[in-house]
Image (cartoon, grey):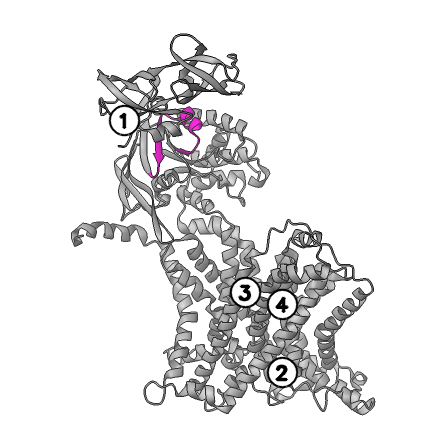
């Protein structure tokens, strides 16, 4: 084909094709590249840049140095134990809800939702008040008052860390397992029983294989989330000299910062997370043979007899340990003059007064967190809407790649996002380090997958002809979006907005490396105050933190129709 | 008002590793003020063609001109929002978050019609489709037929020169479909808009159209009036698609003056109209519609035996085995009652037969 032959139509096509939508789509792609792709690439670059030229020294140090190997080992041990206990608790509760006549089932749902939503670093602080080896209230009670020293528990230990982490991660298994159990058509089980299989045998040979992929997938999600939590691992692990990957990376930023090692260790961290998430997706993909019609006969509930009260007891214990104990402790500490066995003798509002009006960080932190969460959620959702529109509605080559790029952050623990952003923006002429902007970039980058997913599932429910019919009537792309598409996917986008807003308000893992005194956030303020040793005021700030989160969730549930709790099971990599 | 000229239109879709031609080298001349149907089985390329006329799909080759102005070619497509056409979708695509009024007024708002005038036009359009009084309803409060009318009113209110309809009646029940068919036809006559109508229902195509374009395998098979397409199908694919047909293999024995004699194996001889490209000695297939065969009490002529019968109410249908071999499907007046095994004489109206050359 000669150049002349294609010359004219090419120019004509540029005129008619370069319209507003192409600039908007190009802008979204650019955002994604700046937010996610370039920081991850600079992580790679930073890890292999040695003193002179490129070198793999950082990697050899990371996989052989004692400090790093032990951090890796501790993270894996923590992840494994957390996974196992999440599996046991999650499956038991899911089975109780969907297959037995255990009483007060809403309590189980409530326990799972609240456990998932409550920030683990607050639970960790609460457990320190109760179980720190010397001053923990229950330890003191057991050892000094009741003289039962064998009943003391040191929370600065791997078991303590696992306990606090499991409280946050078992809902992943619970939510996936219970939805899988509910979706298994009862006729499968009835068919086995009519052929003579006992209930036990049916459960073992029919039900278990059908729901196993969902359970394994939930367990892997629990694992990935457990090892990414910076707050609890710093609060409980460091005093007990249990250093994990996030806390080791954090330590590498002590003066002088070791950017190369931090990058290499972050990449190692990413590899672990990505492998686990890959397995999780593979398991979940195998779920396809479970009938998800939702119309099948409901399974007959197993009558547990008196045993159901034992199962109910287990639920109540979980609820107390995961919710009541930590929050009533925080509440009690926040009102005490001095935390100890006789704390109730000196109840006071002084801590709240100090935190709210005298400690000059609090108000700034609250404003920063609420502002950042609002803006980050809005951007993440709008960006997600454009990216998924490209994926669902256009035939642009490479759109699948874009979709994958938007999923990358799922494999990035919060602290790794922070390391990547620092690496990238330090090399840029813009001085973003320590500003609210870099925190915003971190939050949007981390949570953009949630925005994409929310928009994607809503868009797929909208028939393209609804947009096409506006177009043929003369509506431009912008008009079609404003008049047709956005109003139709608004409920889905709103749910996605809240799914981003709530975790951003309590984000700690990435913020801890990115904040400055002017851009400090709520979670960082709590952590810093705790580190400085203000015992009682910390609890007051924690309670204020919880009130803000609680209000956000309340508003969310009111406006979003209770979607937060039911959707949280699919929201991977959420909390800090 | 508006004529459409399609030349050499081709579109190939990639499906996995293979590519399938949805439309290949399609030529079509749609005249002003006509009701034209694109007819064919599902997957034949008719909807792809319609969507290329609308501008949703860019052709791989070929052009589409409207009133002499080129709108589509491989490199350059005027987007749908700048074509000024109307389109009615198979699923209606009535916006669920807008009332009937808001749905219909949408196109007028885009055109910046003054609101008083727009209001009048909306009410007129709704009256035209018999939906007066339902302006404030939401689509979820309407029946399928009513939603269909909203979609129609929405397309008509902007007074397009061309209205594209993609199987608009396929989701309605049989009775309503019949009713809407008549209304559509009247609407087209009253408005003078050029209608391009996609359907897989040959009865619908015959009833509605000025011209029918039969498409099969992405290619235009026959373009003509309903009578032409039904009675003088261009090839056996068209004959087969346009209704029940008996296809008999035969040989041309002699040709004279536009007609010829063909002989089927077993000795059945027919004097049929012959296309010019068929000569003596050619192997052909004769297509005989069941209604062009009459059954008489046994007498002189082609002898046959009734082998199967079904009473269908308005007609009776019989299968008769000719003594010379082949079996014919026959439709008769319902009052003609025959029993299986009855001997009959078969009369074939050979002037209504079509003959196609068999590929050697």
Q: Chain of mark 4?
A: A
Q: Specify start and end residues of the magenta stretch as a single range.
A: B197-218
First in sequence: mark 4 vs mark 2 = 4
Please tell me which residue lies in front, B90 or A545. B90
Q: Is residue A485 above or below residue A268?
A: above
| Residue at the disc numbered 1 | B283
Kindly identify the residue that appears in the image at 53 percent across and 77 percent down: A511
Percent coordinates x, y for residue B145 in the rendering: 53, 33
Sequence order check: which comes first, mark 3 or mark 2?
A: 3
In the rendered view of the protein, which quadrant contains the C terminus of chain B? top left
Image spot of residue A412 (x, y percent): 49, 73
Q: Quadrant of the N terminus of chain B?
A: top left
From where the camera sits, is residue B160 visible? no
Q: Is residue A71 magenta?
A: no
Establish whether labels 2 and 1 are both on one chain: no
Residue found farthest to the top? B299
Q: Nearer the viewer, mark 4 or mark 1?
A: 1
**Residue beneath label 3, please?**
A283
Q: Is residue B353 left or right of residue A489?
A: left
- Closer to viewer: mark 4 or mark 2: 4
Pointer 3: residues within 10 angstroms few (<14), some, or many (20+)? some
Comparing labels 2 and 1, the label whose residue is closer to the camera: 1
Residue A567 screen position, x and y as percent: 60, 61
């Amino acid at each position: 084909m000669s150049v002349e032959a294609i010359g004219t139509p090419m120019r004509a096509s540029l005129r008619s094709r370069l319209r507003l939508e192409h600039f908007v789509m190009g802008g979204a792609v650019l955002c994604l590249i700046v937010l996610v792709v370039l920081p991850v690439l600079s992580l790679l670059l930073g890890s292999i840049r040695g003193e002179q030229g490129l070198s793999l020294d950082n990697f050899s140090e990371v996989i052989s140095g004692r400090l790093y190997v032990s951090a890796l080992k501790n993270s894996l041990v923590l992840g494994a134990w957390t996974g196992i206990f999440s599996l046991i608790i999650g499956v038991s509760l899911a089975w109780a809800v969907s297959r037995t006549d255990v009483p007060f089932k809403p309590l189980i749902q409530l326990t799972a939702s609240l456990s998932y939503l409550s920030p683990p670093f607050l639970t960790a602080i609460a457990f320190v008040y109760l179980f720190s080896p010397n001053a923990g209230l229950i330890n003191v009670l057991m050892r000094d008052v009741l003289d039962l020293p064998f009943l003391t528990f040191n929370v600065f230990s791997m078991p303590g860390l696992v306990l606090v982490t499991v409280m946050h991660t078992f809902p992943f298994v619970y939510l996936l397992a219970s939805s899988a159990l509910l979706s298994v058509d009862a006729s499968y089980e009835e068919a086995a029983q009519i052929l003579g299989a006992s209930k036990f045998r049916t459960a073992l040979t029919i039900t278990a294989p059908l729901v196993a992929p969902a359970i394994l997938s939930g367990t892997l999600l629990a694992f990935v989330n457990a090892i990414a939590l910076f707050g609890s691992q710093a609060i409980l692990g460091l005093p007990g000299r249990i250093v994990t990957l996030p806390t080791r990376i954090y330590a590498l930023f002590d003066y002088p910062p070791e950017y190369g090692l931090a990058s290499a260790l972050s990449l190692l961290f990413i590899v672990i997370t990505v492998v686990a998430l890959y397995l999780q997706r593979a398991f979940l993909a195998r779920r396809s043979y479970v009938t998800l019609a939702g119309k099948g006969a409901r399974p007959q509930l197993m009558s547990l007899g008196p045993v159901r009260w034992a199962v109910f007891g287990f639920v109540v214990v979980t609820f107390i340990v995961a919710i009541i104990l930590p929050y009533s402790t925080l509440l009690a500490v926040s009102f005490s003059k001095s935390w100890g066995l006789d704390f109730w003798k000196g109840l006071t509002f002084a801590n709240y007064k100090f935190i709210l009006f005298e400690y000059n960080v609090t108000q700034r932190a609250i404003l920063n967190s609420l502002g950042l969460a609002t803006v980050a959620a809005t951007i993440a959702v709008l960006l997600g809407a454009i990216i998924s529109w490209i994926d669902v509605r256009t035939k642009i080559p490479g759109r699948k790649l874009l979709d994958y790029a938007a999923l990358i952050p799922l494999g990035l623990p919060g602290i790794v996002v922070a390391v990547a952003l620092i690496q990238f923006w330090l090399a840029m002429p813009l001085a973003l380090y320590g500003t609210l902007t870099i925190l915003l970039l971190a939050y949007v980058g981390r949570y953009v997958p949630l925005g994409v997913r929310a928009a994607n599932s809503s868009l797929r429910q909208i028939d393209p002809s609804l947009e096409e019919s506006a177009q043929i009537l003369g509506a431009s792309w912008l008009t079609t979006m404003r008049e047709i598409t956005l109003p139709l996917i608004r409920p889905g986008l709103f749910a996605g907005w809240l799914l981003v807003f709530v975790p951003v308000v309590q984000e700690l893992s990435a913020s801890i490396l990115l904040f400055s005194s002017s851009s400090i956030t709520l979670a960082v303020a709590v952590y810093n105050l705790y580190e400085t040793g203000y015992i009682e005021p910390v609890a007051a700030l924690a309670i204020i933190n919880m009130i803000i989160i609680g209000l956000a969730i309340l508003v969310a549930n009111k406006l979003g129709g209770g979607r937060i709790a039911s959707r949280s099971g699919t929201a991977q990599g959420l909390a800090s | 008002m508006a004529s459409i000229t399609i030349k050499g239109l081709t579109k190939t879709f990639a499906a996995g590793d293979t590519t399938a031609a949805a439309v290949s080298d399609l030529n079509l001349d749609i005249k002003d003020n006509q009701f034209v149907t694109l007819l064919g089985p599902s997957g034949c390329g008719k909807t792809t063609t319609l969507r290329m006329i609308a501008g949703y799909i860019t052709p791989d080759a070929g052009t589409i001109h409207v009133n002499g102005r080129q709108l589509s070619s491989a490199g350059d497509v005027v987007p749908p929002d700048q074509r000024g056409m109307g389109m009615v979708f198979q699923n209606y695509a009535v916006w669920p978050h807008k009332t009937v009024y808001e749905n219909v007024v949408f196109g007028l708002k885009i055109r910046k019609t003054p609101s008083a005038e727009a209001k009048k036009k909306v009410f007129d359009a709704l009256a035209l489709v018999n939906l007066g009084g339902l302006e404030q309803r939401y689509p979820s409060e309407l029946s399928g037929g009513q939603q269909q009318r909203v979609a129609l009113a929405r397309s008509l209110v902007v007074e397009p020169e061309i209205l594209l309809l993609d199987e608009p009646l396929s989701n309605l029940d049989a009775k309503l479909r019949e009713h809407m068919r008549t209304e559509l036809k009247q609407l087209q006559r009253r408005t003078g808009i050029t209608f391009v109508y996609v359907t897989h229902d040959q009865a619908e195509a015959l009833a509605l159209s000025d011209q029918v374009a039969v498409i099969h395998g992405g290619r235009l098979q026959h373009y003509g009036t309903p009578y032409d397409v039904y009675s003088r199908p261009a090839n056996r694919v068209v004959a087969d698609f346009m209704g029940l047909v008996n296809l008999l293999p035969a040989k041309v024995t002699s040709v004279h003056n536009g007609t010829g004699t063909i002989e089927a194996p077993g000795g059945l001889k027919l004097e049929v109209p012959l296309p010019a490209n068929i000569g003596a000695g050619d192997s052909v297939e004769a297509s005989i519609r069941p209604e062009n065969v009459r059954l008489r009490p046994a007498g002189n002529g082609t002898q046959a035996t009734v082998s199967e019968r079904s009473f269908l109410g308005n007609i009776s249908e019989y299968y008769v085995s000719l003594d010379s071999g082949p079996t014919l499907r026959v439709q008769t007046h319902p009052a003609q009652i025959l029993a299986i095994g009855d001997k009959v004489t078969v009369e074939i109206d050979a002037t209504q037969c079509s003959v196609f050359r068999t590929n050697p």
